[in-house]
Image: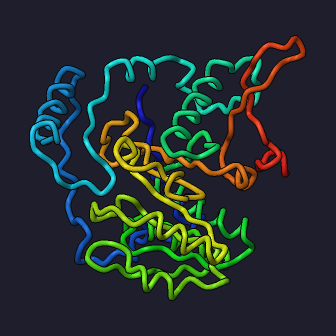
Amino acid sequence: MNFVPNTDSQQAQLLARIGVKTVEDLFEDISKDVRLKRPLNIRGGMSEQELVKHVTTLANKNKTVEEYSSYLGAGAYEHFIPSFVDQLLLRSEFYTAYTPYQPEISQGTLQAIYEYQTLVCELTGMDAANASMYDGASALAEAALMTCDATRREKVLVLQTVHPEYREVMKTYLPPRGVELVEIPFHEGVADLSALEAALQEDVAGVVIQNPNFFGRVEKAEEIAKLAHAKGALLVMAVNPVSLGLLKSPGECGADIVVGEGQAFGNPLNFGGPYLGFLATRDKLIRRMPGRIVGVAKDKNGKKGYVLTLQAREQHIRR
């Protein structure tokens, strides 16, 4: 299909309508010193074969973690992904943004989500998990807000050993809700427990930690949980799911809410995202948990089925 540009008279009408004389006037906010004063150096069109060869040549200049040992870390890591994972994701029912509100036509998708939730609970030692969040950072911010809703307090303590980008997301989420976010310093790579204890007062809703922390150190999670609970605060723990094969589960350590980055579940690095966040909690907080929750129910004939449960929490019901 050929491209038909605006004629000179049409262009003049458009410029007059928006109140400028020339196209250049639209770029007055950009300094003339940095404006390009010549036509763009763009080569002519290419055939499909030429284009594929050109793009492949450019792509081959990339260097990947498969060729080099990477120590970047910070939440995104190269993991072995079994080949069946990609094949499973190619199934058409997973290639949709459709929310399975109609369980009678969505049993396969709902069961897959339910099994995922079950495995997250087994990993974390929690009672319930949701169907996932945007990423680990937003899951952590949502968990912090959960502590405020549950305790009706408006202050959250976060250790400075938590991923700095996670803390930045919390600074975006919490203040607009009227929540005060206080950072607790560290000593020798782990939380300064004396500073934490001094900051823990009766107005604190939750304490947010990461274990292992951003420096790769293991925090004294059980001690922190006791300090938080003694003041009526809740403990939120961000974890790397791979570490839970070796460390005590957050549930055993006394955590009330557990979140993390799910990239390790089978996602490639993908230039840093998108990934997914997981969020799990204890039964007492389940109605304050954001996101979809899949549960098991029985139909009128007594057969087991999967449904989106506790939907009264969700926006489409509240509306």
Q: Nearer the viewer, residue 96 or 313?
A: 313
Q: Residue at x 84, y 14 (%)?
A: 302
x and y percentages locating residue 131 in the rendered image? 60, 39
Asked if residue 204 is positioned above or below residue 243 in the image, the reply reads below
Q: Is residue 262 visible in the rendered structure shown here? A: yes
x and y percentages locating residue 188 in the rendered image? 26, 77
Q: Nearer the viewer, residue 200 or 230?
A: 230
Residue 239 in the figure: left or right of residue 300: left
x and y percentages locating residue 283 in the rendered image? 70, 49
> In the rendered image, which quarter is residue 155 located in?
bottom right
Q: Nearer the viewer, residue 210 or 122?
A: 122
Q: Residue at x 15, y 31 (%)?
A: 54
Q: Residue at x 66, y 62 (%)?
A: 146
- In the displayed image of the protein, which residue is found farthest to the right? 300
Asked if residue 217 is positioned above or below residue 278 in the image, the reply reads below
Asked if residue 271 is positioned above or below residue 196 in the image, the reply reads above
